[in-house]
Image: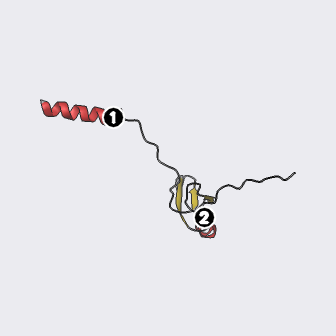
Amino acid sequence: MMKSVLVASALATLMAGAPVRAQTYAPGAPVCLHVFGELEGERIDCIFTSFAQCQAAASGRPATCVMNPYSAQAQPARTVRRVR
């Protein structure tokens, strides 16, 4: 009886947690390949070290290359200062 109460409380605790959302962009590489379409399915692969490398993989496919905003190598957005 005690085992079933412990199992039930453990399951209730696990099921009460909020669902976790996966991060779209992996932080491993600075360039990501965004693949879309019904044939290959929609996904984002962050495995490229250069934009040219990603473009070569995207050639002839329903895909585009994007900069990874979560990469440690990503350049921060530049702000333009106007001089008066």
Q: Which mark is residue 58?
A: 2
Task: Tell me where residue 33 appears, x and y as whole percent.
Answer: 57, 60
Whether residue 6 is situated above or below residue 66 in the rendered picture: above
Which quarter of the figure has residue 77? bottom right
Q: Which mark is residue 60?
A: none
Q: Is residue 6 left or right of residue 70?
A: left
Regarding mark 2 in the picture, which secondary structure is present there?
helix
Which quarter of the figure has residue 68? bottom right
Q: What residue is rendered at 54% in x and 55% in y?
A: 44
Q: Are marks 1 and 2 in contact (CB under 8 Å)?
A: no
Residue located farthest toward the left when viewing the structure as drawn: 1
Identify the mark nearer the N-term, 1 or 2: 1
Q: Which mark is residue 15?
A: 1
Task: Tell me where residue 56 appears, x and y as whole percent.
Answer: 61, 69
Other-residue count near label 2 (Cα within 10 Å), few / some / many at <14 / 14–19 / ≥20: some
Q: What residue is rendered at 60% in x and 64% in y?
A: 58
Other-residue count near label 1 (Cα within 10 Å), few / some / many at <14 / 14–19 / ≥20: few
Disc 1 marks which amino acid?
A: Met
Q: Is residue 23 left or right of residue 69?
A: left
Who is closer to the viewer here, 5 or 80? 80
How many angstroms separate mark 1 from mark 2 (CA)?
Answer: 40 Å
